[in-house]
Amino acid sequence: MHNDIVNTIHESSLLFSNYEAGSGIKKALEMGRDDILFELKASKLKGRGGAGFPTSTKWMLVAAATGADKFIICNADEGEPGTFKDRVLLMNAPFLILDGMVVGGYTVGAAHGYIYLRGEYVYMRQFLEDCLNEMREKNLLGNNICGKEGFNFDISIVMGAGAYVCGEETALIESLEGQRGEPRNRPPYPVNTGLCGAPTTVNNVETLAAVPHIILMGGEKYAERGTSASSGSKLFSISGDCEKPGVYELNWGITINELLAKVGAYNTKAVQVGGASGICIPKSKFDRKLAYEDVATGGSIMIFNESRKMLHVLKNFMEFFVEESCGQCTPCRIGNQKLLEGVEMIEKNQYTFAHINNLKELGETMKVASKCGLGQSSPNPFLSILEDFKEEIFHAKSDGVYK
Amino acid sequence: MKHLKTSRAPISQKAYVPSAPENVDTIGGTVTVQINSKTMTVPFGTTILEACRMSDIYIPTLCAHEDLGIGGHCRLCLVDVEGMRTLQASCAFPITAPLKVKTSTIAVRKARKHIMELLLSEHVGECYACVKNGNCELQDLAKEMGVDSYMFGHDNVSKYPVDRSSYSVIRDMDKCVNCRRCVRTCIDLQEVGCLEAIGRGAETHIDTFMAKPLAEVVCINCGQCINRCPTGALYANDPSDEIWRAIEDPTKHVVIQTAPSPRAAIGEEFGLEPGISLTKELNTAIKRIGFDKVFDTNFTADLTIMEEGTELLTRIKKAVVDGDESVKLPQFTSCSPGWVKYIEHFYPEYLDHLSSAKSPQQMFGTIIKTFYAEQAGIDPKDIVSVALMPCSAKKFECNRPEMDASGYKDVDYGLTAREMAMMIKEAGMKLPSLPKSDFDNPFGLGSGAGLIFGATGGVMEAALRTVYELVTGREVPFEKLRIEAVRGFEGVKQSSVVLENVVPDWSFLEGVELKFIVAHGTANAKKVMELLKAGELYDVHFIEIMACPGGCLGGGGQPVPTNEKIRKARAKAIYAEEETLPVRKSHENSHVAEFYAKFIPEGPCSHKSHELLHTHYTKRGKFIL
């Protein structure tokens, strides 16, 4: 099964380099908790799922939280459209992730970890279970790991059921508990009240994969890569109109222009960065940098060339959100429907600019009023595409009133 | 998955209670919060919404309800919290650190307006043609926010068929705004869980298991969801049209019995403060509407006490003296049809614990079409028997197939307090200003013991007053007959009374500690049932359970809105009225004694009484085909 899946890795500087399974755990256990947190802080590692929360802070909060049980969860619910880097990591570098979880479990004081695996990735479950068994045999999982007295840790795999929103950490936890996958109110945050009410850290696959490297090479060395606010390397899932789609591991701070040249993209009109919930970058802004301080992304890069109609692109995204909203809060559940209706009105040339402006204001409301990140980011494509491609989209209206 | 919890209610729907110090005077017990320009100190963990209400700042809310866990679904209560990137739902934000909150910034007001417009855009229907017109939270909010046009449209195409399958609750999901109060009521408050959010995104709606009709799922008909629905999506099955028709039909003799709880609450429908009883004004209104007779359900409440009390003593005697192991103790009350259906669904193996005595409504139904028909010389087929109840489940109860001891359908229609108020309004009357009049004979006298059936603990109190006196020959040893141990709104109340110096007939009860439990709301019923299952209630004799929070006065047919304050006011009114009555013990009701002498001379729990005043139950289980 492993070999049936072809993963196209075009370029890699770190994550897919040689890594001896278990070496990160052994080093980490020698270092102790404080030193691990120190190195993580020095590495300036931020969450790779897209939100960019500092990993060291998250782990520190869970480590400091009081609770008999603590949990570490690997968020492998890779559901953002255009993202496939976690799949590649899970299949090509599983031990990097699993070792990262063990190190995390040790650091925060968790005795159990869960991998929340996207429903569509069920084919890799057996492979991952085999990896876990291999680790158990080598005492990298189980009781007194690597001879460390009192450090007991194990990992289970739980399958998701295909809901996009379950990539949101609190919805993921609800789903893991066997409930309907819907985001919780925050506060309280999962670092205090997470899985079954216990302090919980939820980390992206790629974040966890970076941890063993940071442990081995040292935080400062890792932070030499990338920019000052965005350290290290990042996996980008490249798809769309280019010659060489696939996974690229590049250092943070690369401009979109540089990236397009690397992947062989020509006549590019727009690049959707960050998946459906990300923003659409028009040609005039291709000098922007991919970094948390400029264009932040969980790694999804979709390239659209001159032949693509941006309104269709937008409609596709909005249809996605209308379907994938969890339906819990009003702004997201109904707001996305209204935005989609707006797009359809434009498509049929049956709109007024007054209404489109109302919808843009609604989009701004959704960004601040929705319960979770899904609804807060779902108006992004609507707002950015209508703004940056207004000439193309509104060409049918000739009165030129649009402002 | 050994770590995972097993309770059914999602954590997200439970109120988040941070570990606050018990004493707010200790350091860390309070937090300072600045709301707009006003700085105040609130207990640690207070939500922003609560803090705003404390300082008289109005925040619009829709999904929040005092009785329920935190939702955070509708987002109408958004406020601006300094330092937060997004606006925060004030109902769901506990204050655990000093905060600065602004409640009416431009962004906040715009967001609220947008949300309101979005809610209205999917709320199908027009206000004039709605059962909740005039008492609708959504309507009120739209007015408050000055909605003058539909910015995002207004759907008039029906998406869901109206579910009229249930005798009690009608669901019109076109009017639903997905606040999920009904879901939280059903799961958190009642632990029934027959309503849940189904589907995702635009398809999200509230539905039953496998989208079955409400009559075919585990719904117990308690109607608590109706009491908390902010729109007209849930309402009771209204029989008033049929009743009007029967009143106009000269061949029909229409009688009505009125339960204690609607009388203590119906004034709310006419703008009165909660807690004002309008018993005698109601009698006048009913007569003016055209009912031929108005009877007091307290009469059959007394009858219930006679039957149920005798049954209890008989069970205890069989168990203690005869050593009969087939006798099931503790005995449960069976007055609450919501509770009866709950135990039929969720604990069918314990049905033998349920008293076989009918509820007061059904006892009355039987004797109206037998005893009364005989006395008054009316053919029972011409009698239309209506029951004014605080309850939606009573509508189901009177339609149970076994409820035909009189040879006819014992009770023809169950009418809620809300529907009665509507009938009075339709008849052009203002209830509070009507003159007073009495109940009709031969059932004109009801004791105070029957009256307090309306509050949680009332049946127990009434039963104790009678059982204790029967057994010992003395009054219950409490001042003014107030048995405080069973009063109040605590979820599960447990107490006991020792029977000493008993009369010779009951000598085997000498020194026995009579133990009893009172619970209200089926979530509390579940706690009791789980204790029973675990074998911890082996020495308890009698358990009163009411399906609704607060007992019947909080029933699913009572005026909307409801909250604990309102329910307490109603309870106060009932207890106050009780003490003004001349007879306060069921066995001292002379009309009851007369009834037994004339109609069932063999007395309570005799053969004839079993035929007419007792019933049996159905093992339903959780899985219905």
Image (cartoon, helix red, strand yellow):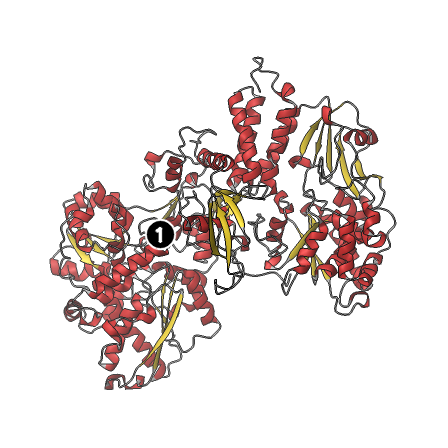
Three-letter code, disc 1: Thr
Q: Position of residue B26 (x, y in %)?
A: 51, 64
Which image quadrant: the C terminus of chain A? top right
Q: Secondary structure at mark 1?
A: loop
**Camera-nearest residue between B327 and B49:** B49
Note whether residue A63 is visible.
yes
Residue drawn at (34%, 41%), measured in percent from left and top?
B132
Q: Chain of mark 1?
A: B
- How many circles with numbers are drawn on the protein? 1
Residue drawn at (26%, 51%), measured in percent from left and top?
B266
Q: Position of residue B159 (x, y in %)?
A: 46, 36
Q: Residue A268, relative to residue A91: is it above or below?
A: above
Q: Is residue B336 left or right of residue A256?
A: left
Kindly identify which residue carries mark 1: B562
**Quadrant of residue A381 within the rendered picture:** top right
Note whether residue B624 is visible.
no
**Camera-nearest residue between B191 and A17:** A17
Q: Position of residue A162 (x, y in %)?
A: 64, 45
